[in-house]
Each structure stands twice: as C-alpha cells, then as structure tokens.
Amino acid sequence: MIETLGVDQTAQATPQKRCDWAQSDPLERTYHDEEWGVPKHGSQALFEMLSLEIFQSGLSWQLVLRRREALRKAFANFDIQTVAGYDQADVDRLVQNADIIRNLAKIKATINNARVIADMFPGEEFDRYCWSFTGGKTIYHDYLTILTTPRYDHLAEIVSTDMKGIGLKFVGPVTAQSFIQSVGIVNDHMHGCYLNAFQE
C-alpha cells in the first residue's frame, strides 16, 4: 500500500511503540524518533546521509551512529567542496584514523561522490536531484512487520541505477533504499509505530 500524505510528524502523541529495530539502543531510539523518515533538505545534509549509509553497508547502523561525530570531523562536516578537494594524503590520513570506519573503498567512494556532486550539482541542485525521484513528495508505506519489509523496492532500484549512471559509487539498491528512508523521501515506519502515517 503506497500513498502520499501530508503528515506533520512532529505533532504525534507520546511515543508508545517504535519500529522493531529501534527498541533498545538509546542512540537508535533517538535517531528513529528525531530523524529517520523525516524529510531532510540541503545538499550538504543529504551528502552526509548518503555517505553515512555507504559507511554502514555491511555493518550495523548502531556502529555508524557511534562513529558519526568522528566521521563528521574527519570529513569536514561533510562539506561537499572540501571533501571533493581531498587528495591521496587525505586518503592516507583517513585510513589511519582509528575513530572512523577505516574502509578504503568507502573512503574513496565518499571522496568520489563529493567530486561528482560538486561538479554536477552546484548549490542546492543535489537536493533537487534527490527529491526529483518523487516529485518533492514523501512516499508513505505501511509495512506490517520487518519480515514483510523489502530490502529494497522499485524506487530504490531507480535511484541506485540513476546514481550509478552519473558516477556515484557504492550506491547499490540496498544502500539507496537506506538513503531514501533516512532522509524521508520514503517513510517506512512500520505498522504500529507511533510515527507510522497510517496510525488512527
């Protein structure tokens, strides 16, 4: 079931139940309650979330949240122009930084992506690009359980294919799905979660 609704997520009642993945860890609960599925705008903010989802690939989101501030510091608060200017010395520095996720392929992908975005999407054009896939609207789903939630859907396949086509790296459909969920292009709060748009 897919529907586009104009829902003010900030006007919800006191939390009663969260999505299954956000039940225990305090960092995940805060992220779930305050960020996940909330429409996010601004090219720099979107670049940060795309980069964090890339670093999360194959790992837990809890780990990324714990390293988030260190990643922000290491990547100049994810300033696109600054990261686009990183050279081999910066790569070497990042690989030696024990506070971040030291995956060479992910580090290089993040720098590559900053260069692509800086070259193709000046100013807030990357924001417009990301939101163009849904015409600027959030798509709301109502999945019953985590078992019925797909690893990625058709929209994520479209986003992944397009991002790869313009030269972005490490943006397979699973990462694309996580990205569009994280920035509120889709809202996948599960049935029963207090942030689910279909709650009565």
Image (cartoon, helix red, strand yellow):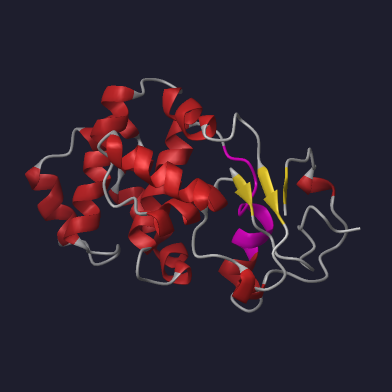
Identified at 47% across, 49% down, the residue is 156
Identified at 29% across, 29% down, the residue is 81
Let me know if residue 35 is in the magenta part. yes
Let me know if residue 12 is in the magenta part. no
How many numbered marks, from 0 up?
Answer: 0
**Place of residue 153 in the rendered image (x, y in percent of width and height, measured from the top left):** 52, 55
Quadrant showing the N terminus: bottom right
**Place of residue 150 in the rendered image (x, y in percent of width and height, measured from the top left):** 55, 65
Is 29 positioned to the left or the right of 14 in the image?
left
Look at the picture and state if 123 lies above or below 159: above
Instruction: Spot the residue most to the right.
Output: 200
- Answer yes or no: is residue 82 visible: no
Find the magenta span and give its range.
Answer: 30-40
Q: Quadrant of residue 162?
A: top left
Q: Quadrant of residue 68?
A: bottom left
Instruction: Spot the residue most to the bottom.
Output: 24
Identified at 38% across, 46% down, the residue is 160
Look at the picture and state if 138 lies above or below 98: above
Instruction: Spot the residue most to the left.
Output: 88
**Place of residue 18 in the rendered image (x, y in percent of width and height, measured from the top left):** 72, 69
Is 126 positioned to the left or the right of 155 in the image?
left
Identified at 19% across, 49% down, the residue is 108
- Answer yes or no: is residue 29 visible: yes
- Closer to us: 38 or 192: 192
Quadrant showing the C terminus: bottom right
Is 75 positioned to the left or the right of 7 in the image?
left
Look at the picture and state if 44 lies above or below 28: above
Look at the picture and state if 42 lies above or below 171: above
**Place of residue 29 in the rendered image (x, y in percent of width and height, measured from the top left):** 64, 67
